[in-house]
Amino acid sequence: MKKVSRLLIGFLMVAGSFNGTQAQESSWTTGVDLVSSYIWRGTKFGSGPAFQPSLEYAKGGFAIGAWGNYCFSDNQALESDLYMSLTSKSGLGITVSDYYFPTAKWFKGSSHYIEPMISFKKEKFSLLAAYMLGDGVKDLYLEAGVTAGPVNLTLGAGDGQYTAGGKFNVCNIGLSTSKEVKITESFSLPVSGSLILNPSSEQFFIVVGISL
């Protein structure tokens, strides 16, 4: 856990310098997504539908939160993650995530995977680079995205866990969109849909989700 502490301390030091340029408005948000399948960076985890709760506190460009995944059908793909992110007005972002899987004890260092990530978003374009570390894992993931009208296009590549054989390859080609489905005059549900192709594993997925 010493590596985790060093990363978090370094992140907070950077946060202090970034936050000086942000409006200091704060808010708490919570929600849950219901998805037909849990697909992450081109790979399917668990089986059947899943619900994904989240909780976040944000102030200016700084945010700290928690996100989880729990499949309806079994105990596969259990996930309880913590993260801190910092976003500047220019669109540059830094995120440190702690991926934890509840099948192992939380205080055991080898049950945590730490991922520093740098992202950049400007109008319709986005880029990110992430490097996951922990228990012998050193996996790189790169992604580029573009928004074309109501559609988001994604191209991702990585190595290690992301690809068949572990060599660097394209693993996530995605097309997604979303809309508000009106239920009553005063209530509507955000519904999303995605088509995801993983050329490395030669798998294709169709996913729908509802956000509450």
Image (cartoon, grey):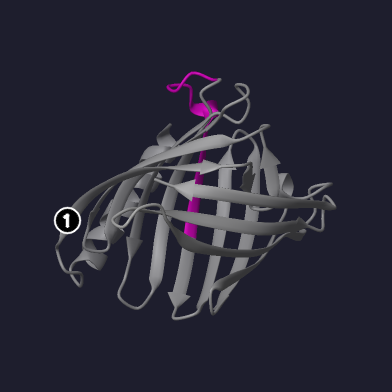
Residue 118 sits above or below residue 89 on the image:
above
Span shown in magenta: 104-117
How many circles with numbers are drawn on the protein? 1
Please state if 50 lies on the left or on the right of 84 as rendered: right
Residue at image position (51%, 23%) is: 102
Q: Residue at x 50, y 55 (%)?
A: 191
Residue 184 location, x and y as percent? 35, 53
Tag 1 secondary structure: strand
Mark 1 nearby-residue class (10 Å; few <14, some 14–19, many ≥20): few
Q: Which quarter of the figure is the N terminus placed in? A: top left
Which residue is rendered at x = 16% and y = 69% of the image?
23
Residue 107 is one of the magenta-drawn residues: yes
Q: Position of residue 107 (x, y in %)?
A: 42, 22
Residue ID for mark 1: 26
Residue 166 x %, y %: 79, 48
Check the image and name the residue furthest to the left.
Answer: 24
Residue 102 vs 52, above or below: the answer is: above
| Screen quadrant of the C terminus | top left
Identify which amino acid the numbered label 1 is placed on: Ser
Q: Is residue 135 above or below residue 203?
A: above
**In magenta stretch: residue 93:** no
Side of 157 relative to 32 (left or right): right
Q: Quadrant of residue 194?
A: bottom right
Taking 11 as reference, is 164 left or right?
A: right
Residue at 62% x, 48% y: name it. Answer: 40
Q: Nearer the viewer, residue 210 or 61?
A: 210
Q: Nearer the viewer, residue 204 or 130?
A: 204
193 to the left or right of 90: right
